[in-house]
Amino acid sequence: MGRVQDKVAIITGAALGIGEATADLLAQEGARVVLTDIKDREGEAVAQRIRDAGGEAFYLRHDVAQEADWETVVRETLSRFGRLDVLVNNAGVADACPPEEETLEHWRWLMSINVEGVFLGTKHAIRAMKGKQPAGGSIINLSSIAGMVGVPDLGAYCTSKGGVRLYTKSVALYCAKNGLNIRVNSIHPGYIWTPMVEHYLAQHGDILEGRKAADSLHPVGHMGEPDDIAYGVLYLASDESKFMTGAELVIDGGYTVQ
């Protein structure tokens, strides 16, 4: 216990799935957490559960594609907790579409959340982390195995997650070479059983059959759970990973080694 004691963390997309599990785990390990999402009821419930368990947490409505929302979230975080140590850029969307049927409107919508949201969060987190004493922090960007290998019908999603992967490396180098003491790493989950994946499977056939098919894609024989990713976030948020920046933490049940 206490692996991130007294660190202040912002977690986007924290109402459900990986974000929810991450908020719970960081709070259990001593962090003060700011949960953001557009699913207000679920997000408030997660924050209340953390407080009921003795942790420090609050929820803010947050469209990650809007810079004004990022400014508000960071300002409120600094106002309440006085610092920012960890940013988990977790919010994202996924949608399947054959490339010849993809629309520019849909493409731009997905990029605005998955890529621009990460850019905006990183920008404002660096500003906050530079301003505290001592300066420093950890930015953790949720990419995907789809940012490393191609997946049919997921062209926009693959592009967005590949962008997150390389943007992470660029910013990590910038922070290191400028002595900012801010580490920037990406996490690449395999298929994780979350409401987003369940919704995707429901749109494309039978959920049970879809889960069996997704399970079979992983050499370990099954999909991952949100906690599997949350523990990776915890490691990167903690000082245990102080020599790690610009890296790809792949947590995928062996998917990408095939």
Image (tube, helix red, strand yellow):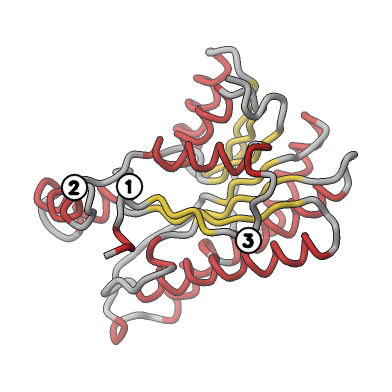
Image quadrant assignment for residue 77: top right
Disc on res. 84: none
Within 10 Å of disc 3 (Cα), the crowding (few <14, some 14-19, many 20+) is many
Which residue lies under the disc numbered 3? Answer: 246
Q: Where 101 falls versus 39 (above or below)?
A: below
Q: Secondary structure at mark 2?
A: loop
Image quadrant assignment for residue 103: bottom left
Distance between the Cα atoms at labels 2 and 3?
A: 30 Å
Residues 84 and 72: in front is: 84
Which residue lies under the disc numbered 2? Answer: 221
Determine the residue positioned at 40% across, 68% down. Answer: 157
The answer to whether one can see residue 163 in this image is yes
Residues 113 and 2: in front is: 2
Q: Secondary structure at mark 3?
A: loop
The image shows residue 130 at horizontal and vertical percentages of 85, 50
Q: Where 96 falls versus 36 (above or below)?
A: below
Which circle's residue, 2 or 3, is located before the other in the chain? Answer: 2
